[in-house]
Image (spheres, rainbow, N blue to C red):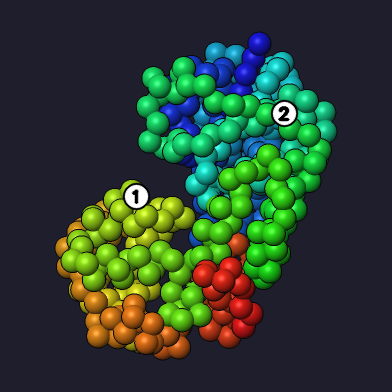
């Protein structure tokens, strides 16, 4: 039996766990920046075309496997599975929000290929794949479920909601049953919590950054360490961008962030890392007032940031009341 695992970048360790003939990790970050277009995502999973050769392709991050030739790796993912007689496609996506977004994206894509449905199995990965040891993954018992049309329909509905130009449909998902996609609802709550608060103008991760700095954690390596903030939406690079937004606006909430970060090329990872390491952070008086709920950060600072398909600006600032689970329109 030939078996393929589809997973997020958190699941790259599965390639060393000997649980499948081929492991395909998806690398897209859907939690920050503009979402890739549907055409771009289709090309990613489809045939590698010469005119788009500089774009990433699903095969870029797949270890060589003996049953797929190098030439055929340029083919569409599902074509490879069909051509090489794959009997089972397992979906391994843990509860982390970006992984759950990848899951609904790939299920929405697979919905257009009904012939593949009977070969699909959803694994209930209720642990952090990124920190899992491959030798333990090899023998770990992970429940699996068949995928049926209703599951694909829920995934398509959720993916459409996240791509919508406002967060209203996503907020509506919290009151709907989501079937086997049991981790999607808490993931969506985490994502909605990153919308600005009605009291402070900060999202959940921005708030935790200020709280940690106020508690004496003034080094970025302490803030960027996995799990240090107790939030799970953004990775290290995205945390850096949030920190800059808190430090470099007209009314900064944070002092001490190296000013060179404001002018360095975003792709200059080495210099940016050095600048972050040099920084010694503290809250400004305004930052203390924001953290205490006496000031609204967004009334004094601009915002232009993507949340799914929603572009947040000061004129179109959707907010999320986390305590009351209430979306507040601009």
Q: Nearer the viewer, residue 208 or 256?
A: 208
Residue 34 percent across, percent down from the top left: 57, 62
Q: Residue at x 65, y 65 (%)?
A: 171
Residue that mark 2 sits on: 146
Rendered view: 206 above or below 289:
above
Rendered view: 243 above or below 268:
below
Residue 139 percent across, percent down from the top left: 46, 17
Q: Quadrant of residue 43?
A: top right
Q: Residue at x 25, y 85 (%)?
A: 285
Q: Secondary structure at mark 1?
A: loop
Rendered view: 127 above or below 215:
above
Q: Nearer the viewer, residue 110 or 319?
A: 319
279 left or right of 183 in image: left
Whether residue 301 appears in this view of the structure is: no
Residue that mark 1 sits on: 227
Q: Quadrant of residue 320?
A: bottom right
CA separation in Å, label 2 and label 1: 32 Å
229 left or right of 15 in image: left
Disc 2 residue crowd, few under 14, some 14–19, many 20+, Cα 10 Å: some
Q: Quadrant of the C terminus?
A: bottom right
Q: Secondary structure at mark 2?
A: strand
Disc 1 residue crowd, few under 14, some 14–19, many 20+, Cα 10 Å: few
Q: Residue at x 40, y 31 (%)?
A: 132
Say which label, 2 or 1, has the lower sequence index: 2
Whether residue 268 appears in this view of the structure is: yes
Q: Residue at x 20, y 70 (%)?
A: 281
């Amino acid at each position: 039996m030939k078996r393929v695992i589809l997973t997020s970048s958190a699941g790259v360790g599965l390639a060393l766990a000997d649980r499948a003939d081929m492991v395909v990790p998806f690398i897209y970050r859907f939690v920050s920046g503009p979402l890739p277009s549907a055409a771009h995502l289709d090309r990613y999973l489809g045939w590698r075309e010469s005119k788009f050769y500089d774009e990433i392709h699903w095969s870029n991050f797949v270890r060589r496997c003996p049953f797929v030739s190098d030439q055929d790796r340029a083919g569409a993912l599902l074509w490879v599975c069909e051509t090489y007689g794959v009997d089972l496609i397992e979906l391994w996506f843990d509860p982390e929000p970006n992984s759950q977004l990848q899951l609904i994206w790939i299920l929405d894509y697979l919905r257009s290929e009904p012939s593949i449905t009977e070969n699909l199995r959803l694994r209930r990965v209720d642990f952090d794949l990124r920190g899992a040891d491959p030798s333990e993954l090899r023998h770990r018992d992970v429940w699996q479920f068949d995928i049926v049309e209703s599951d694909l329909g829920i995934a398509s509905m959720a993916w459409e909601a996240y791509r919508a130009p406002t967060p209203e449909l996503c907020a509506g998902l919290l009151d709907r049953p989501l079937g086997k996609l049991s981790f999607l609802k808490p993931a969506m709550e985490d994502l909605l919590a990153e919308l600005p608060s009605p009291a402070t103008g900060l999202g959940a991760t921005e708030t935790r950054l200020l709280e940690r700095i106020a508690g004496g954690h003034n080094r970025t390596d302490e803030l960027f360490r996995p799990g240090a903030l107790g939030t799970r939406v953004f990775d290290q690079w995205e945390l850096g961008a949030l920190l800059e937004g808190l430090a470099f606006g007209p009314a900064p909430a944070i002092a001490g962030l190296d000013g060179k970060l404001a002018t360095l090329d975003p792709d200059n990872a080495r210099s940016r890392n050095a600048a972050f390491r040099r920084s010694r952070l503290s809250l400004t008086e305004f930052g203390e007032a924001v953290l205490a709920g006496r000031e609204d950060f967004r009334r004094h600072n601009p915002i232009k940031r993507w949340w799914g398909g929603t572009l947040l600006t000061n004129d179109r600032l959707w907010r999320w009341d986390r305590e009351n689970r209430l979306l507040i329109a601009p």
